[in-house]
Image (cartoon, rainbow, N blue to C red):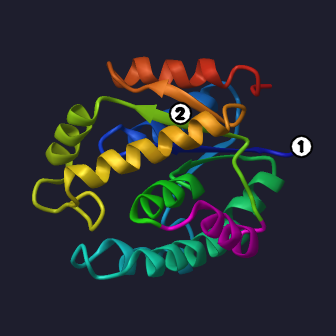
Amino acid sequence: MSGRFISLEGGEGVGKSTQATRLAEALRDRGVDAIVTREPGGSEGAEAIRDLLMQGSVTRWSAHTEALLFAAARADHVEKHIRPAVEAGEWVICDRFIDSTRAYQGAQGIDDSAILALHAFGSKGLLPDRTFLLEVPQAEGAERATARDGAGADRFAAREGSFHEAVGAAFDRIADAEPDRVHRIDATGSPQQVTARLIDALSDLLP
């Protein structure tokens, strides 16, 4: 039986990593073979590229270079990890995927069609069976991210508020344009409440 591919998306501090782990645990409790991965990263080659992308100054790479590096990391991740796992019948829960590139590099002026063209070439256009856009008010997300990172914010989290507003607007456009795939999830409240919302929003895909 073929597995499923689920991605969690959203801006900084919305709880993607926490919910990816909790969602996989909740699925396992229901007898579903679920694993967690992340982007950038998830395979040996992609993790090496992650170090290049996430470390250093905000201006280390141009938006065009970032888009190319993300596409290369994703291509390796898909080939080495995601596709084999789904074909083996596992549910893959991914902390970020192509929509993060569309939002973060799109917010820097990279055309969405160019990002999708890179994805079509590198990852053969793979899209999740379902994408959850976790949403909290931007101020709350910023507070969570600051509490999480302290002085150790990565190149993207460290950017100014106007950038994160543009990222949020880009995620909104994606969700509005692709409602069959992208489902908005209220990520306020306790982690348990958010996980329950995710499971409810997956009910039609669960065996």
Q: Of 2 and 14, which appears nearest the observer?
A: 14
Magenta stretch: includes residue 114: yes
Q: Left or right? Give the position of 147 relative to 180.
A: left
Q: Which residues are magenta?
A: 110-124
Say the numbered circle drawn on residue 23. Answer: 2
- Find residue 186 and report its image quarter: top left
Say the numbered circle drawn on residue 184. Answer: none
Residue sitting at 67 percent across and 32 percent down?
179
Check disc 1 and report its element: helix, strand or loop.
Answer: loop
Q: Left or right? Give the position of 46 relative to 27.
A: left
Mark 1: few/some/many CA within 10 Å (<14, 14-19, 20+): few
Residue 106 picture location, percent across and down: 48, 60
Q: Of 172 and 185, which appears nearest the observer?
A: 172
Q: List the residue tagged with mark 1.
A: 1
On the question of residue 44 being in view, the answer is: no
Q: Earlier in the sequence, mark 2 or mark 1?
A: 1
- Find residue 6 and report its image quarter: top right
